[in-house]
Amino acid sequence: MTIRLGGMASSLETESIIQTLLDDRSAPINTLKNKISEDEEIYASWTQIDTEMSVLSSNSQLLTNYTTWAQMVMASSDEEVVSGSVTGTSLAGRKFLVNVSTLAEEHQYHSYAQDATNTELGLEGEFTVNGQTIAVATTDTLQSIMSKINSASAAMDGVGVNAGIIGTSLVLRSNATGTANAMTIADTTGTVLATLGLTDPDNETAAKDLSATVNNVPVTSATNTGIKDIISGVTLNFNATGTATFSVEHDTDNIKSLLNDFIASYNEIMAYLEDQSKVTVSSASDTVSDVGTLQGDSLVNKIQTKSRLLLSSITTNPNLMDQDFNSLYKIGIWFEDEDNEISITDEDALDDALTNNFEEVMNLFRSYGTDGNGVGVFRQFSDYMDQLTDPATGSITVKINSLTTRISDNELQKAKLQSQLADYEVDLWQHFAEMESSVSAINSASSYVFNSLGISNDDN
């Protein structure tokens, strides 16, 4: 335990003296604290940049992926007649004429109308539905017979049956459309079905298969939707009878959506870099009022310059790219004034290029070129993003790792100096305590001598 004695004997302002000495020794620690604080702020900025660059990198990669450009959509002239989706990639530009004459329907029986649905029918006997026997007692009602049929449905042959009540009639309906899924019902003992009218031909709605033509080729199906075996790579849904056309087209809406995602993420990171590197001058005093955390950082400047250079690049070799589509500018994508932000400046031009010159636009975006190094705008940009964000060798990764190491080293040095300062303070208090003890002893001895000589200390 450190003994802290003030200047009781020496009349010195011990604590003030020691604090002055400690303050002098604290200067290197304060310098380290400031460096750590500055580096932590820089680290936070680069971490934010790394996060946003990772998003930008992903968005640029999507614009170079084969899947993005191979994706197709089905465009129907009347989706109330026919709709669907496309998984194949070889049908671009194909058109089809569809005529739906009959939709697939479920097989259905309904009973005669009864007095009530919860009144005992007084019928007794057994009947089968798709191979399952249903036993009926005189106390059964329409509702209880419905419940018995539904309980047996899972064990029935085929797709099963759904029983329900409409008004005061019992309705049996196959769980799937098509003639292959027609129901079989029959009285086995008694006449329950016949009495209820379920075997009356007038009370039966026959199962039907889909009947249609596609480009004048007859097609049939037990179902109306999710049909994959008519056109390879196309899933068709027939929704109503009638005539319609559909075509298989490149999914340009998805490409534009991904492009807008890229533009949004690009502009966001460029605005952040601008904010972090700017110098604000006060208009009132003509002096610097604020300096961005990364002002003067060469990597920030390089990212800004290189990014714009890549997105504004022009491929002049006609062997590599159609010269009418050799830059983003020619399809309506460019920079706004002198800002580093990019936008779709001419949406009509972009739509026209995607519709009528799809291959040329795809080449502009993602071409590898002849040497595999990439000449497509987003191919080059994506490669540059990899150089920045690679988890091992990326420039931003190296920057962050360097800052982390520097902060850690300075924290260790600060802790070492603080420990030395604490030891130094203990030594100072010890020395002053010893001095106070010595002065006190001298004072006591001099008082004794003066008293022995009959001399008062006050006289001296």
Image (cartoon, rainbow, N blue to C red):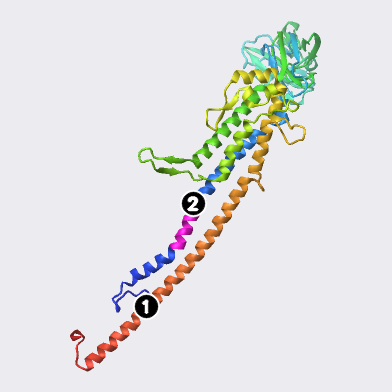
Q: Position of residue 221 (x, y in %)?
A: 78, 15
Q: Bin the neighbour count of mark 2 within 10 Å (Cα to Cα): few under 14, some 14-19, many 20 and up.
A: some
Q: Bin the neighbour count of mark 1 within 10 Å (Cα to Cα): few under 14, some 14-19, many 20 and up.
A: some
Q: Which residue is mark 1?
A: 433
Q: Is residue 339 left or right of residue 154?
A: left
Q: Which mark is residue 38?
A: 2
Can you say whether 397 is above or below 104 in the image? below
Query: Picture quarter containing residue 78?
Result: top right
Q: Is residue 23 left or right of residue 269?
A: left
Q: Is residue 228 left or right of residue 451?
A: right
Outermost residue toward the bottom in this view: 453
Query: Picture quarter containing residue 140?
Result: top right
Q: Position of residue 215 (x, y in %)?
A: 78, 10
Residue drawn at (28%, 86%) of the image: 444
Outermost residue toward the left in this view: 459
Whole-Å distance between the Cαs marked 1 and 2?
40 Å
Q: Earlier in the sequence, mark 1 or mark 2?
A: 2
Q: Kindly state the secondary structure of the residue where label 2 is placed.
A: helix
Outermost residue toward the top in this view: 202
Q: Which mark is residue 441?
A: none
Q: Quadrant of the C terminus?
A: bottom left
- The stretch of residues the image draws in magenta is 27-38
Amino acid type of disc 2? Glu
Amino acid type of disc 1? Ala
Residue drawn at (25%, 88%) of the image: 447
Can residue 123 be seen here? no
Q: Is residue 364 left or right of residue 409?
A: right
Is 173 included in the stretch rendered in magenta? no
